[in-house]
Amino acid sequence: MKSLGLWLGSPWRRSAVAGVAGAVPMVTFPAPALWWLAPVALVPWILLARGAPTARRALYDGWCGGFGLVLAVHHWLLPSLHVFTFVIAALLGALWAPWGLLIRRFLGGSPSPGRVGAALLVLPSGWLMVELVRSWQGLGGPWGMLGASQWQVGPALRLASVGGIWLLSFLLVAVNVAVAALIAVRASRVPAVAGLVVTAAVTSAAWAWAPRPEVDERVAVAVVQPGIVAGADSADRRFDRGERLTRALVGREVELVVWGESSVGFDLVDRPDLARRLAALSRETRAEILVNVDARRSDRPGIYKSSVLVGPDGPTGDRYDKMRLVPFGEYVPARALLGWATSVGKAAGEDRERGTEQVVMEGGGGLRIGPMVCFESAFPDMSRALAEDGADVLVAQSATSTFQRTWAPEQHASLAALRAAETGRPMVHATLTGVSAVYGPDGARVGSPLGTDASAGRVHEVPLADGVTPYVRLGAWPVTLALLVLACWAVAEGVRTVRLRRNGPEPLVPPVRTARGWPARPGR
């Protein structure tokens, strides 16, 4: 241990170790999907920051760990953004700097049982604040939140219906803190074990109390995935392939057909021939078709990505314009300042325009559809709003064509399981090139997904559920709890500081030596 401490004495080596420690949670997400490592994935990072020799070094440990985490979970952006990926990781990684300081404050040195007990609340609360801030779409959105690693764990999905992904992240960090305390702080093993027991008890109670979605009927929904289409005329050829795959569904008694993001590359007003072909498909399949138009609008300036519902008579008038755009992928933040990103990577040459409100579409058969586009499925508040507005089924239209043969397609598809479990509404994740998947109202997968090598149409019997989950009713209450915990701690720290200043330090009085050389008490 002493030699390890000497080796970590180099600031550069320590920063590198912090970056690697912060990257460990990456393996808990798809494609590796080692979800069972999540309860200990933060332990190396916590142990490192706990042993920081100074508060400043703890800040750096938090920052470097955050840099490693952001870079790891977004590594698939490197071919598109190149060096700018490191810039983004460095900026976002700074959000974890205060968290590193909190670790040292509560677990550094020989913490008392009370400090360890407080750490089990304060450190998860601090982590949640970081996830809350970085969830702002201007900072890249909530991709890679720790709780999302549990997308295929049934009990975790039940908990998501109670407190959303926020509750999962809070509990996972609490377990990591308890494990770190068990390893490093022998004198505080009792509160660490107690913390694990309490966490398990709270988790079990929430799991038992969480209402199960009551399935009352099923609806046949088809996902059409054309696969990779390249070339200068790719928009026309992609439409042709989607049309052919949809026509193959004739006779399957489908109620809704879903195409992926940018499945139509032309405005349907400017191209009435495409609108007529879609209407003919709707008549032949006896199903409405939800397409996604990525084109310059004829009725207003700019390029929009829009979900458009088409029936047997053409577009029904239901349209949703994407609201939350992908930074650098669909627009460049502060383009006057950061426009150089287009010269070093595949950043958007022209900004897409934003929609102004979410829309619940009314299908002809009474099915209420809540559309989202691409990485909007990462935002729990958007799916919650659609469920509140009465959506029967959530739909995310996506295109991960740029990131084939990376972990991005599988990770993106997994987010739909969380959104379904949180809202108690089934979710369809339809893409151009995979992974396309469908999840029931409990977050369990329905049927088999379409992988990145597939070009097909697949019908799923999607279960519909009634009722409202606690998360839809109460919202992100774990975030409110975390804010209260941090506020209480800040008040306690403020009171403690005032008392120390008021009382002042005890005077340092040198001992008085007697004739025999023994120290005597002052005044004797």
Image (cartoon, rainbow, N blue to C red):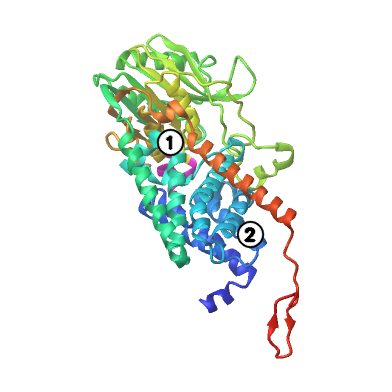
Contact? badges 1 and 2 (CB < 8 Å): no
Magenta region: which residues? 402-412
The residue at the point 60 percent across, 60 percent down is: 61
Residue farthest along the front direction in this orientation: 524
80 is higher (above) or lower (below) than 212: below
Instruction: Look at the image and tell me whether residue 76 can be seen.
Output: no
Say whether residue 249 is left or right of residue 44: left
Identified by mark 1, the residue type is Gly
Find disc 1 in the rendering and name its residue: 163
Q: Is residue 71 left or right of residue 464?
A: right
Q: How crowded is mark 2: few (under 14 residues within 10 Å), some or many (20 or more)?
A: many
Q: Nearer the viewer, mark 1 or mark 2?
A: 1
Residue nearer the viewer, 456 or 451:
451
Counting residues from the start of the chain, the first of labels 1 and 2 encountered is: 2
Q: Percent from the top left, x then y, of residue 443?
A: 34, 35
Q: Which of 285 and 135 is in front in this view?
A: 135
| Residue visible at 41% across and 46% down in the picture | 149
Residue 15 sits inside the magenta stretch = no
Left or right: 105 in relation to 211? right
Q: Where is residue 354 in the image (x, y as percent from the top left)?
A: 60, 25
Say whether residue 140 is left or right of residue 510: left
> In the rendered image, is residue 311 in sight?
yes
Q: Which residue is drawn at 28% across and 20% down?
A: 254
- Asked whether 175 or 260 is in front, the reply is 175
Q: How crowded is mark 1: few (under 14 residues within 10 Å), some or many (20 or more)?
A: many
As displayed, is residue 200 above or below residue 455? below
Three-letter amino acid code at the position of disc 2: Tyr
Q: Where is residue 417 in the image (x, y as percent from the top left)?
A: 37, 36
Quick one: which residue is furthest to the top in this view?
Answer: 313
What is the number of the mark on residue 60? 2
In the picture, the quarter occupied by the C terminus is bottom right
